[in-house]
Image (spheres, rainbow, N blue to C red):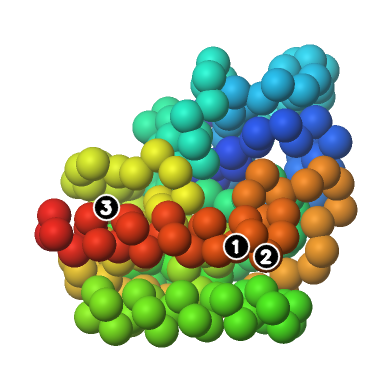
Amino acid sequence: MEESKIKLSIIIPCYNEEKNISLILNKFNEVIKTNEIEVILVNNGSLDNSEAVFAELVPNYNFARVVKVEINQGYGYGITSGLREAKSDFIGYTHADMQTDPADVIKAFDIIKNATNPKNTYVKGDRKKRKFLDQFFTTGMSIFETIYLRTSLWDINAQPNVFHRSFFENLENIPKDFSLDLYLLYMARRKGLDVIRIDVFFPPRIHGESSWNTGLASKWKFIKRTMDFSVKLKKEL
């Protein structure tokens, strides 16, 4: 694919996702109808057979390429490693678990490129039809973050996220962990970007297991880390 034609680079961080790689590529192949979009798969320090699967499958898809992170340093680090390799006008990311439909990426791209001021626009998913417990925790965290940071922050971890590269290039001290979603949404609000939310549906994961959402204890751990980061973020900014 010619680099000059690419208008959107979508990053997918993959940590031990060998069973999902073919599904990711096939799903994106179904929805990508233009040479303006590339998919950057980040092999985020995977310990399974992902590297061999990438080597076998990715050459068959002209919209895809791989960025390798030798040692996993976190979800946020994997995504930013991919974003820094993107050369397109618009960049963004979504998850490898395919709980967010790749068609939502196309929808987000269409919205942002047709916006009145695309450089000042941030498009983000808003998850629907989730399990009660997951929605309960999301609502609680959204209320806490909104009140504590005095900024409207709803469904912080929803995917996909698409924005102009100039927004990303002006950020500093980007977190390496799952706090990335909070940081980017907060900074988009703080910098006055027009944040547009799109409905996305969130079916169960098909293959593999979440690296963090493994039960009630893991949810509380995630919440504590997010709250700790919020305190740090408020002090710094």
Say which residue label 2 marks: 216
Say which residue label 3 marks: 167
Residue type at mark 3 is Phe
Asked if disc 1 and disc 3 are in contact, CB closer than 8 Å, the reply is no
- Residue at x 48%, y 64% (from the top left corner): 223
Residue type at mark 1 is Lys
- Cα distance between the residues tagged 1 and 3: 30 Å
Q: Nearer the viewer, residue 8 or 21?
A: 21
Where is 59 relative to 13, above or below?
A: above
Quick one: SS at disc 3? helix
Question: x, y (%) of residue 100?
Answer: 69, 61
Quick one: SS at disc 2? helix
Q: Is residue 26 visible?
A: no
**In-image side of 115 versus 62 (left or right):** left
Where is 70 relative to 209, above or below?
A: above
- Cα distance between the residues tagged 3 and 2: 35 Å
Asked if disc 1 and disc 2 are in contact, CB closer than 8 Å, the reply is yes
